[in-house]
Image: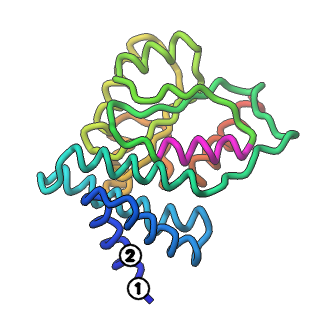
Amino acid sequence: MISEDNEVVEFVEKLIEIDRLGAEQIFNAVREQRNMSQTVDHLILPALERIGQGWEDGSIALAQVYMSSRICEELMTLIPFPEPPAQAQHTEHARMAIAVLDDYHLLGKIIVSSCLRASGYTFYDYGRVTAQELANKIQEDSIDIILISALMFRSALQIKELKRLLDQAGSLTHIVVGGAPFRFDSLLWQEVGADAVGTNATEAVAIITSYMKQRSQT
């Protein structure tokens, strides 16, 4: 049996070679041994983190980062996500949104979005935006809580600019962040001015649930 680390190494090789078929074969082999959450946490996220590091140190081209992310997004469509329970629609407590700050990596957003929907939450999906665009949308839609996913370190740093813009506008929007840069540096979320950090989609949902509970009690 191939070790977990070797699975990630081989998966990375297939991704940067833009070998979708080879990547899918490894992905399917891991899926046979693990559930959806484990497949994401033990294969996809570590692979994309390594690719992101490669881009940061100049060994991997941006085009390879982008295509690797797209392949992973396509592979994720092979995993059926549960439908949200009809009785659990959290729409009355807070206005919520999710976004990526000028980052080509959308997989984290896709995973968190799917888990939020499966938990019965509704939210705005702003896609890939700049800090200024996101600040504008947050104010226009009166967003109470914004979730931001980042793969690149430079994208994570833009959250600091978003925080500045929101403070300047007098916004009290709660910022929740996640992604590789925040796993590499456990204090980064505080440095960029976020209110909370989640290391995976499950934690993100738990943070939202806790926030909603506190809000309903005030």
Q: Residue at x 50, y 61 (%)?
A: 40
- The number of discs equals 2
Q: Is residue 52 above or below residue 32?
A: above
Q: What main secondary structure does the magenta stretch of the protein show?
A: helix
Q: Residue at x 43, y 21 (%)?
A: 134
Are the residues flagged by discs 2 and 1 in contact, CB closer than 8 Å?
Answer: yes
| The N terminus - image quarter | bottom left
- Name the mark on residue 2: 1
- Residue 113 image point, x, y percent: 59, 41
Q: Which comes before the other along the chain, label 2 or label 1?
A: 1
Q: Quadrant of residue 167?
A: top left
User: Which amino acid is tagged 1?
Assistant: Ile
Which structural element holds mark 1? loop
- Residue 177 image point, x, y percent: 45, 41
Q: Is residue 143 above or below residue 178?
A: above
Q: Quadrant of residue 16?
A: bottom left
- Residue 126 image point, x, y percent: 50, 25
Residue 71 shown left or right of residue 52 in the figure:
right
As drawn, the residue found furthest toward the bottom would be 1
Residue highlighted by disc 2: 7
Q: Residue at x 59, y 15 (%)?
A: 142
Q: Which residues are magenta?
A: 108-119
Q: Quadrant of residue 128?
A: top left
Which structural element holds mark 2? helix
The foreground one among 119 and 43 is 43
- Name the mark on residue 92: none
- Residue 64 image point, x, y percent: 24, 50
